[in-house]
Amino acid sequence: MINIPAVVPIARPKIGSAGKTGLWRVERPVIHYDKCTKCRLCVLYCPENNIDLLENLYPQIDYDYCKGCGVCAQVCPEKAIEMVREVK
Amino acid sequence: MVQVLKRKALALVGNHAVAYAVKQAKPQVLAVFPITPQTTMLEKLAEYIASGELKAELIKVESEHSAMAAIYGAALAGARVFTATSSHGLLYMTEMIYWAGGQRVPIVAAIATRAIASPWSILDEHQDFLSKRDAIWIQIMAENVQEAYDLTIQAFRISEDERVILPVMMGFDGFILTHTMEKVEVLEDYEVDSFLPPRKFNLIDFSDPVGIGPLAQPDDYMRVRYDAMKAMERSKSVIEEIMREYEKLSGRKYDLVECYKCEDAKYIFVTMGAWSGDAKVAVNMLRDEGIEAGLLKIIVFRPFPKEKVQEYLRSAKGVVVFDRDYSYGSGGILANEVKAALYGLQVPVYSVIAGLGGKDVKPIHFQKVMEDLVNEKLEEERWLL
């Protein structure tokens, strides 16, 4: 626990207080793990901080909150992330 | 009888004296960007780390803005931190200075005061330091190298006091103190250790994550600022208490202000920083002439020691405030503070602006001004051009 004896500006953000924003997605980023080199650029660039590392250090996207912006697919040097239409 | 010096005395320039104090304070993280006239302090700190005398991480940052950002984060994570800068570096650091003040993070920064461009100058002026007066930082200022050493050690303690929790800026005059070698009595390492125990409170907890400096609604924002105001007011008595404790340890007396022959004085100078020494010489020259002169030196500028200023100046026949800075369109910054503190008391306050851009000021300048005041020839505001 924090024990600051003063009034300081801190916040306790809640996960998904705006609901599951993944529902807004039009295109879904799909990682082709055979091409992934574990460089982690997608993790760094994700504007929602929504890509975690698995125990084997491969990235994993949380589709509950991914809005499908496509930044990860753009920055991937191996073109290992493909944007796939959600609705046909 | 031979008097044995109890203390170890070293010959140190101001920058090295502050570096020595920082070494003894044992910060874990430093982030400093070199700038004249602070650079030799950074070099000394790097030497201490290279030789193993100081076990700290020195982050080589690309700017002063990053320097403050880096130690802001490190202080949140629990480290004791330090940075130092000057003039344009301080201006570049300004955004993060306000972040640190608003977030109430214990930080110590040494500011080698220096004029601000344009025109370009590397010499002494208090403009840079005093431009940070509203950043929720405690500001203290040294008169000589010994004070720069002593106040640096005390700054860590003040900053980390649970009743305060505010960053502290220690100002000392660029070149006049940073590059002047003086005899400095230093404390032993174990004495500093006992005076400066590790911080008792956490600012963040990695197992209980929080957002730092988030968007605040107006009600919350004002509440945070109100508490900062209260902490600043409360810090006055805490600083006095810490300074008394330091006096017991070192034998050197410190207070929010220093009164030099001002108790019985009718005409009193008010100064801050290195030229207080010149003012003391002038006081003695004036006393030789039969003028009852004195000096009130401001050591702590934020929080401004209003009560002490009132106490010492309330019965003066004339007060002359020397400013090495100016609030353009208003007046001398220190003069304005003194006038505000004396509001309602019938004390005539005169303002003298001198030494801008490092222009030399000597005791005779102080003497001449005071003679003019006694002879009723001093204007309300005079620039020593």
Image: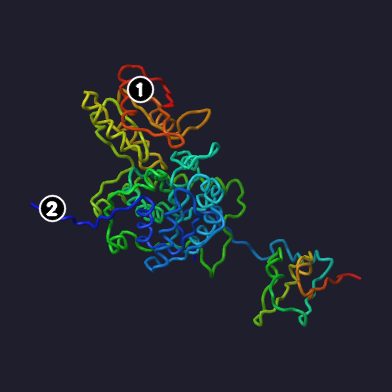
Q: Quadrant of residue B139?
A: top left
Decide which of B214, B278 is in the foreground and name it: B278
Q: Which mark is residue B139?
A: none
Query: In the rendered view, how is the structure colored?
Result: rainbow
Decide which of B56, B316 is in the foreground and name it: B56
SS category of the residue bearing label 2: loop
Alpha-carbon span between mark 2 and mark 1: 48 Å
**From the image, which quarter does the C terminus of chain B lie in?**
top left
Q: Amino acid at mark 1?
A: Gln
SS category of the residue bearing label 1: loop
Say left or right for A29 vs A7: right
Say left or right for B146 vs B35: left
Q: Amino acid at mark 2?
A: Gln
Residue B40 spot, x, y in % from top left: 42, 54
Say left or right for B79 vs A70: left
Residue at x 66% of width, y 79% of height:
A57
Residue at x 36% of width, y 23% of height:
B348
Residue B132 spot, x, y in % from top left: 49, 43
Which residue is the site of mark 2? B3
Q: Chain of mark 1?
A: B
